[in-house]
Image: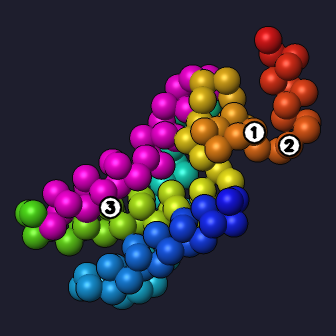
Amino acid sequence: MKNILKMEEALMLALAVYLNSFLPYEAWIYWALFLTPDIGMIGYVLNPRVGAATYNIFHHKGIAIAIFLVGALLTNNVLQLAGLVLFGHSSFDRMLGYGLKSGEGFQFTHLGVIGGRMAEKARARSK
């Protein structure tokens, strides 16, 4: 099942790249912006709860789709590009096992604990 979910995320990333090909930008611009959603991690400087909130805003596929659709309705290519970057990046992260974060800490996601056994020990200690 895990491999099927990873394949599904890979196909969503491919969809974002494909849809980007219809925008009037060179392909390298998409890839140059590809890691920008990770700016959401800046909230972890304050604390895990704020970090989780800011990270999740930049990695929520529903928000990405909404931004893309608003861009399509307004024929605003910049918004469409932003939505595709957010969507593609989120799919890529989920392929790697990085899901939406919980307020407990960066390693605790909706897909499970990142880092395996050591992360689970850290969780047990924090309770």
Q: Residue at x 38, y 83 (%)?
A: 18
**Crowdedness near tag 3: few (<14), some (14–19) or many (≥20) residues, C-alpha within 10 Å:** many
Comparing 86 with 113, the one in front is 113
Query: The C terminus lies in which quarter of the figure?
Result: top right
Q: Can I make out residue 63 in this image?
A: yes
Decide whether the magenta segment is chiefly helix, strand or loop. Answer: helix
Query: The N terminus lies in which quarter of the figure?
Result: bottom right
Query: Which residue in the structure is indicated by mark 3?
Result: 83
Label 3 element class: helix
- Which residue occupies the extreme front position in the image? 1
Q: Residue at x 15, y 67 (%)?
A: 72
Magenta run includes residue 45: no
Label 2 element class: loop
Q: Position of residue 83 (x, y in %)?
A: 32, 61
Query: Which residue in the structure is indicated by mark 2?
Result: 116
- Which residue occupies the extreme left position in the image? 74
Q: Position of residue 90 (x, y in %)?
A: 51, 57
Taking 31 as reference, is 96 above or below it?
above
**Crowdedness near tag 1: few (<14), some (14–19) or many (≥20) residues, C-alpha within 10 Å:** many
> Could you tell me the amino acid type at mark 2?
Gly
How far apart are labels 1 and 3 at the CA level? 27 Å
Q: Residue at x 47, y 78 (%)?
A: 14
Q: State the extent of the magenta-drawn residues as a range.
A: 46-72
> Could you tell me the amino acid type at mark 3?
Gly
**Crowdedness near tag 2: few (<14), some (14–19) or many (≥20) residues, C-alpha within 10 Å:** few
Comparing 4 with 67, the one in front is 4
Tell me if label 1 and label 2 are in contact, CB under 8 Å: yes
- Report whether 115 appears left or right of 4: right
Label 1 element class: strand
Query: Which residue in the structure is indicated by mark 1?
Result: 113
